[in-house]
Image: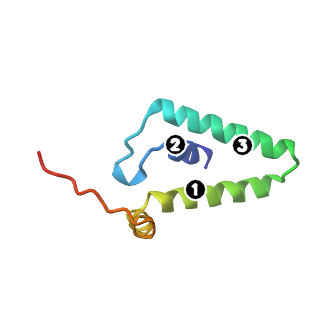
C-alpha cells in the first residue's frame, strides 16, 4: 500500500495508463515515510496507521476521478476548458 500511495501522492494518474514522474514519486515516497515515522513517534498503533493510509488512498483516487473534479468545478463556478484538436 505504501508504494501505491507514494506514486499517487507523486501525481501518477492511475486511470491513464500510469504516466508518472520519477522525481514526484520519490517525493511521494519521502512524504509517506515521514508521515509513517511521525505517526509511530507520537504513539499511533500500526493498525491505525494502515487505516489512515487506506483512507488517504481512497480520498486521492476520488479526487482524481472525473466525476469529483466536475462536481468541484461546479461548486467553485469554474468552467471546464475544452481541448482543441491540433
Quadrant of residue 56 in the image?
A: bottom right
Q: Which residue is mark 2?
A: 7
Number of the label disc, if any, that sits on residue 35: 3
CB contact under 8 Å: marks 1 and 3: no
Horizontal side of residue 5 vs 42, given as left or right: left
C-alpha separation, residue under disc 3 versus residue under disc 2: 15 Å
- Near mark 2 (Cα within 10 A), the count class, few <14, some 14-19 or many ≥20, is many
Q: For the point 84% across and 53% down, which residue is it?
A: 45
Residue 51 percent coordinates (x, y): 71, 59
Q: Secondary structure at mark 2?
A: helix
Viewport quadrant of the C terminus: top left
- 23 up-or-down from 33: above or below: above
Q: Which residue is mark 1?
A: 57
Horizontal side of residue 65 vs 59, given as left or right: left
Q: Secondary structure at mark 1?
A: helix
C-alpha separation, residue under disc 1 versus residue under disc 3: 14 Å
- Near mark 3 (Cα within 10 A), the count class, few <14, some 14-19 or many ≥20, is some
Amino acid at each position: 500500500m505504501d508504494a501505491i500511495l507514494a506514486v499517487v501522492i507523486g501525481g501518477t494518474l492511475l486511470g491513464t495508463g500510469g504516466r508518472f514522474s520519477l522525481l514526484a514519486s520519490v517525493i511521494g515516497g519521502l512524504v509517506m515515510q515521514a508521515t509513517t515515522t511521525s505517526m509511530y513517534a507520537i504513539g499511533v498503533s500500526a493498525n491505525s496507521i494502515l487505516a489512515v493510509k487506506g483512507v488517504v488512498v481512497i480520498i486521492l483516487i476520488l479526487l482524481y476521478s472525473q466525476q469529483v473534479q466536475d462536481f468541484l468545478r461546479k461548486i467553485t463556478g469554474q468552467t471546464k476548458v475544452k481541448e482543441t484538436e491540433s
